[in-house]
Amino acid sequence: MVEEGATLNQTTGATTIGEIVERDWQGLGRTDLSAPGYWRRAWGRFKRNRVALVALFITIAIIAFTLGAPLISKYVTGFNYSENHLAEKLAEPGTGNYILGADGNGRDVLTRLAYGGRVSLLVAGLAALSILVIGGTIGAVAGYFGGLLDTVLMRLADVLLSIPTLVLLILVSSFYQPSPPQLALLIAVVSWAGVSRLIRSEILTLKNRDYIDAARVSGASNFRIIWKHLFPNVVPLIVVWASLVVPTLILVEATLSYLGLGVRPPQPSWGNMLQDAKQFVRQAWTLVFIPGFMIYISVLCINLVGTGLRDALDPRLN
């Protein structure tokens, strides 16, 4: 045995089998033997989807454009979103300092487009977050505890799902004038039922797993089990849901504002910009095209990103 060990040491320069394996892997240029994690594999699959990747870059550019509205107002156009110059109303794009023209009240379109996009995306983002908080909490509680509580909460969700959301929003918005945060909360209050059922179904499949039983036996509270053990496994589902529901919420906000029931002038949004421009469509078609195109390209790109995320996070590909 000693002679064999000595021979192994002399011929390979290694004293143990582990050192031999490590040296061979280094010779092949592989030093990290760990497998890529779930999110790294998902990002690798997402990058291979060129359409979704381009849509992600466009979405980031739109968000940066809206977040930079004060900078655009101060350093690019020199106008604020409510500043009127009636002598220059309906100015064509490229006229003077009006890069995208002026609307029927002589207000700079580019400035209002940036501020209007900030409002539209803010309402959609806050509404999605509020829907997730309300619906996610209700769905997780109903799915985890079950019984009578589950029955009552899900029947309430069924009632909301049976009522057309847009009609209910129009009815409620007609009674008072909501600010953007209030409008987002209003949308969330009438729209949480769908995600609650989605999360409930996922919790029902997870709560009987062995690691949940182990956490329960070790003395973990129900809150800790839901937050620390169940919620992280629902995150991929939530990411995909959010990326697919935000475009719908952008359209909902634009529809309400176009009908005069959402964000009201002089505060701009893409929806009320369309509403203001419809009477000038023959004299200045760009006033309708520009905010309409921004709604279209935003909804399209976020939808494409959501589709790419859905494919990348598909557990069947792991």
Image (spheres, rainbow, N blue to C red):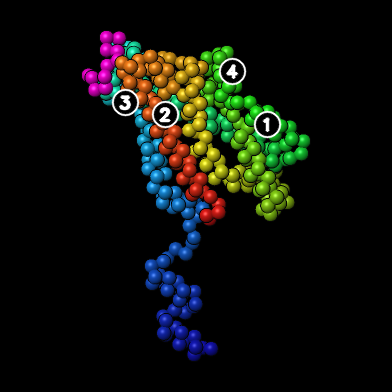
Q: Amino acid at mark 3?
A: Ile
Q: Amino acid at mark 2?
A: Ile
Q: Secondary structure at mark 1?
A: helix
Q: Residue 3: percent from the left, percent from the top?
A: 49, 90
Magenta stretch containing residue 90, yes or no? yes
Residue 172: image tag: 4
Residue 72: image tag: 3
> Mark 2 and 1 residues: CB-CB less than 8 Å, in contact?
no
The magenta region covers: 86-96
What is the residue that sits farthest to the top in this orientation?
Answer: 87
Q: Amino acid at mark 1?
A: Asp
> Mark 4 and 3 residues: CB-CB less than 8 Å, in contact?
no
Q: Measuring 77% from the left and 35% from the top, which residue is drawn there?
A: 148
Q: Measuring 37% from the left and 43% from the top, which residue is drawn there?
A: 54
Tag 2 residue: 295
Tag 1 residue: 158
The alpha-carbon separation of the residues under discs 4 and 2 comes to 24 Å
N-term-proximal mark, 2 vs 1 = 1
On the picture, is 137 further left or further right than 92?
right
Q: Quadrant of residue 198?
A: top right
The alpha-carbon separation of the residues under discs 3 and 2 comes to 19 Å
N-term-proximal mark, 4 vs 3 = 3
> Mark 3 and 1 residues: CB-CB less than 8 Å, in contact?
no
Magenta stretch containing residue 9, yes or no? no
Q: Measuring 46% from the left and 24% from the top, which residue is drawn there?
A: 254
What is the residue that sits farthest to the right in this orientation?
Answer: 148
Q: Nearer the viewer, residue 120 or 101?
A: 101
Q: Residue 154: percent from the left, percent from the top?
A: 70, 34
Residue 80 visible in the current orientation = no
Q: Secondary structure at mark 3?
A: helix
N-term-proximal mark, 3 vs 1 = 3
